[in-house]
Image: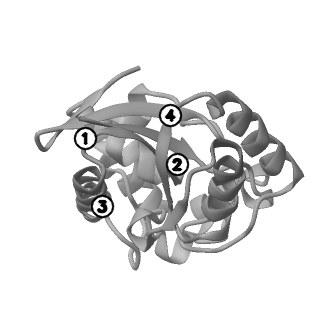
Amino acid sequence: MTEFLLVRHGETNWNRDRRFQGHADPGLNRTGREQARALADELAGEPIVAIYASDLARARETAEIIGESVAAPVVLDKELREIDVGEWQGLTWPEVEERYPEGVRRWHERGHGWESGETYEALGERVGAALGRIAAEHPEGRVVIVAHGGTVRSVRAFVEGRSVADSRRESPAMGNCEVFRIRAENGTFRRLD
């Protein structure tokens, strides 16, 4: 059995400004680094065998801060990246509503509204395959996965048997440096918290 601690990265200026980040690569701001250090302190006593992180700067920086505290190696994995939000990248919600009203309608109904990005189904397949591979590499132990809000939301929706759109309507977004724990066993995932 592999226990996963899925972590949303620390705050960036784009989070603070409520901009869609997607595959954009802003680093952590001061608050984000403080959040990562606080989480690292919380995890310091846990037996972490490895840390995997999205290769985007905000996740990588968060993972490196945690890694220093728990003395676990950090492995970067592009498959753990945030969803590609296409033409919405870099925009605030009011800007998206003004420029893409039909996309906003689709976003509320199906979970994504951008035209040129990735679907949540594709994200789920990508991240699910990565978690399966990581679980096979660490069949016993606790592994930290540092990723993104959309990435973790996708996993949470899958584990709970819901669509991402339903999850968004029914569950609050994860905060920066919040942890979602799941267990992987025999190819299945189960929520622990």
Q: Which mark is residue 47?
A: 4
Q: Real-space Cα distance between discs 4 and 2?
A: 24 Å
Is 70 rendered above or below residue 115?
above
Badge 2 element: helix
Total numbered labels: 4
Which callout, 4 or 3, points at the residue further toward the start of the chain?
4
Q: Nearer the viewer, mark 4 or mark 2?
A: 4
Give the camera-side residue of 180 and 3.
Answer: 3
**Residue at (55, 30) in percent of width and height:** 46
In the image, what residue type sits under mark 4? Pro
In this figure, which residue is indicated by the disc labeled 3?
Answer: 130
Q: Which mark is residue 149?
A: 2
Badge 4 element: loop
Q: Real-space Cα distance between discs 3 and 1?
A: 14 Å
Q: Real-space Cα distance between discs 4 and 3?
A: 21 Å
In the image, what residue type sits under mark 3? Ala
Which callout, 1 or 2, points at the residue further toward the start of the chain?
2
